[in-house]
Amino acid sequence: MGKIIVRLDRVMADRKIGLNELSEKVGISNVNLSKLKNGHISAIRFSTLIAICETLHCQPGDLLEFSEEN
């Protein structure tokens, strides 16, 4: 079965934005954003994904990657 890899940390580094700043702009807690960044989630709301994409000026595919596990 495949898995989804979260690449939020890479996009944040490319945009030179920290966790606290992104958290404030997106409107979610540092804890929840950190869990997302580290891949410790099983779901994400579209509204959260939209807010992150708007703030980071990126596409959902920049943040999420599908990997087939062998």
Image: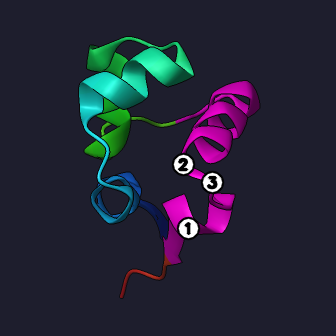
**Disc 1 vs disc 2: Cβ atoms closer than 8 Å?**
yes
- Give coordinates of residue 47: x percent, y percent: 73, 26
- The tag earlier along the polypeptide, 1 or 2, is 2
Say what amino acid the circle numbered 3 marks.
Answer: His
> Which of the two discs, 1 and 3, sits closer to the camera?
3
Q: Main secondary structure of the magenta part?
A: helix
Q: Secondary structure at mark 1?
A: helix
- Give coordinates of residue 70: x percent, y percent: 36, 88
On the image, numbered disc 2 is attached to which residue?
56
The colour scheme is rainbow
In this rendered view, identify the residue nearer to me: 11 or 34. 11
Q: Is residue 2 left or right of residue 31?
A: right
Packing grade of label 3 (10 A; few <14, some 14-19, many >=20) is few
Q: Residue at x 36, y 20 (%)?
A: 32
Q: Which residues are magenta?
A: 43-66
On the image, numbered disc 1 is attached to which residue?
62
In this rendered view, identify the residue nearer to me: 31 or 18. 18
On the image, numbered disc 3 is attached to which residue?
57
